[in-house]
Amino acid sequence: MTAAGAASGASWAARLAARRAWEPPERRGGGRALAVTAHPDDEVLALGGVLVTLAARGWAVDLLVLTDGEASYPGLGADAGRRLAAVRRAELDAAWQRLGLAERGRVLRAGLPDTRLPEVEEEVRSAVVRAAAAGGAPDLVLGLWEHDPHRDHACAARAAAALAAELGVPSVRAPLWARVWWASGDERVPWGSVTRVPLGEEARERLSRALAAHASQVVGFEGAGPLLAPGALTALAGDGLVVVP
């Protein structure tokens, strides 16, 4: 971990500590949520705090992951990419179990091309609509952030936001790589709409075990990686961060 990475993580944490805590909508007996992500591991890195909070409140949650993350290591050949996709599908199933959500909802997969979601944006939107219909209309839509610097994340976020608007239900949006690549004082960060997702020790342990399930990203794959360096994980550590409309 570099000194710059540690400083960036501390800066984000300090600003986040001053934000109000996020609370899910009140639903007697829990509600139903649909989470939309671009890649396996987004559910932990971006939405993990929200997901464990909902699970603790009795919510049912379905997850739609739009790609299998087969292009996370661009230097891999086609055959290795297919092997990586299979590995990442299994890793996501294990992470979902460790988050405590396997009994509360399903993992749905669209199988769209990794790193190329903006090129198939209509298919992205159709996949999100189908996922919502398959599980019954959600009371809450969870997504990534439409201004995240990763273009797949931004595309996935636009589709999730469009669904929430169409259904007239609340949504939350979670920045991911913005927290790693940008300084906390960057003017693009909408601090006025940011809320903090407070995590207790049990929730932090659950998230740590879920992230460890994504070994291809945190350890490496066939000699490549890891993709998630210690500095990035430091920047993402601590309470969750979500943007609310």
Image: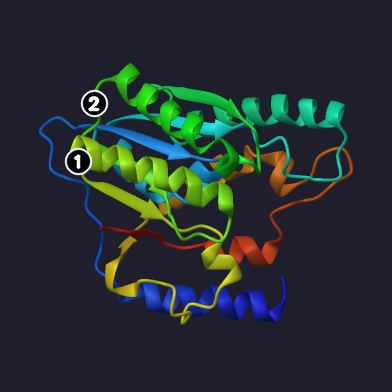
The answer to whether one can see residue 169 in this image is: yes
Q: CA gap, disc 1 to disc 2?
A: 9 Å
Q: Is residue 58 left or right of residue 176?
A: left
User: What amino acid is at disc 2?
Assistant: Ala
Marker count (numbered): 2
Q: Which mark is residue 200?
A: none
Residue 125 position in % (x across, y down): 42, 33
Question: Which residue corresponds to mark 1?
Answer: 169
Circle 1: is it few (<14), some (14-19), or many (20+) Cα within 10 Å? some
Which image quarter is the N terminus in?
Answer: bottom right
Label 1 vs 2, first from the N-terminus:
2
Horizontal side, residue 181 vs residue 244: left or right: right
Q: Position of residue 65 (x, y in %)?
A: 51, 33
Residue 206: in sight, yes or no? no
Q: Which residue is mark 2?
A: 137
Question: Around disc 2, counting alpha carbons within 10 Å, would you say few (fewer than 14), some (14 to 19), or many (20 or more)?
Answer: some
Please tell me whether residue 201 is drawn above or below residue 170 in the rendered image: below
Residue, x 71% and y 24% (percent of image)? 86
Q: Amino acid at mark 1?
A: Val
Taking the spot 73% from the left edge, 40% from the top edge, the residue there is 71
Provide residue 188's location: percent of width, then percent of height.
Answer: 44, 74
Image point 48% across, 77% down: which residue? 184
Label 1–label 2 contact, CB within 8 A: yes
For the view shown, which residue lies furthest in the top direction?
A: 134
Q: Secondary structure at mark 2?
A: loop
* The one of 30 and 199 positioned closer to us in this rendering: 30
Pick whichever, 204 or 220, lies toward us: 220
